Image (tube, helix red, strand yellow):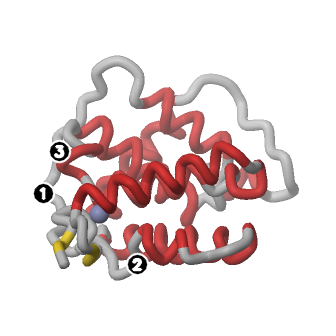
Amino acid sequence: MATCPGCGLETPGGEATCQTLFHELTARDAGDYRYARFHRIAVDAYSLQHPEQYCISAKSLMAHLGGLCCAFEFDGESEVYHALLRSLNGAPALEKPALPAFRGHVTIADVLRAAEPESHGHEVRRWARSVWEAHSSLHPFARGWLAKALADRQGPVRPRHGGRKEAIK
Ligand SMILES: [Zn+2]
């Protein structure tokens, strides 16, 4: 068995097998809308577990870390995602912090064992949650950036549900 240096998954093929699993997941998401809605947080979770490939710059790190912050602390609110993406346009003034060595106990292999959309969604969220919690040292970095992104955005907030406007201030 070989260990994926990113996420720690043990398979006969190590890192190459882990990459193959990521392509399988992407194909699953692309082929079926019931899976597609979990695609963004799956990509964020995978990228944060494999930062040597997907979080090389401070900007890409924040794209994925901020994505999980939005998913778990802002209920996946699309206004917050859009503010995050806008804040990362061009060359944002970001310095890359030190990354944690431990990146969560759940891996992509757990997600691919799920055989239907409901358990798939459950497993993707459990995976992403474990990655987000493993990055607790970077939560202030993500929250601070998102707060600034929300404060800087143009135009008024259009709340879609009662009270949501207050929630994302
Ligand atoms: Zn891996």
Q: CA distance from mark 3 to mark 1?
A: 7 Å
Which residue type carries mark 2?
A: Val
Quadrant containing the N terminus is bottom left
Residue hosting label 2: 106
As helix, strand or loop, the secondary structure at mark 2 comes to loop
Ligand 1, seen in the image, is in the quarter at bottom left
Q: Position of residue 87 (x, y in %)?
A: 44, 30
Q: Earlier in the sequence, mark 2 or mark 3?
A: 3
Categorize mark 1 by other alpha carbons within 10 Å: few (<14), some (14-19), many (20+).
Answer: few
Direction from residue 47 to residue 84 in the image, left or right: right
How far across and down, in percent of the image, does residue 112 sit? 53, 69
Please give left or right for residue 158 compared with residue 20 in the image: right
**Residue plotted at (30% across, 35% down):** 59
Q: Secondary structure at mark 1?
A: loop
Give how far apart the Cα atoms at labels 2 and 3 are. 24 Å
Q: Residues within 10 Å of mark 3 (few under 14, many from 20)?
A: some
Residue at 68%, 77% (x, y): give it.
Answer: 119
Counting every numbered tag in the picture gives: 3
**SS at badge 3:** loop
Question: Disc 1 residue type?
Answer: Ala
Circle 1 residue: 98
Query: Which residue does the image show at 45% across and 46% down from the upper left?
Result: 146
Position above or below: 94 against 131: above
Query: Of the residues shown, which amino acid type is indicated by label 3?
Result: Lys
- What residue does disc 3 label? 96
Q: Earlier in the sequence, mark 2 or mark 1?
A: 1
Percent x, y for residue 106? 40, 78
- Of all residues shown, which one is farthest toward the top? 90
Q: Would residue 147 be seen by someone viewing this image from the given angle?
A: yes
Q: Position of residue 110 (x, y in %)?
A: 48, 77
- Alpha carbon of mark 2 to alpha carbon of mark 1: how far? 21 Å
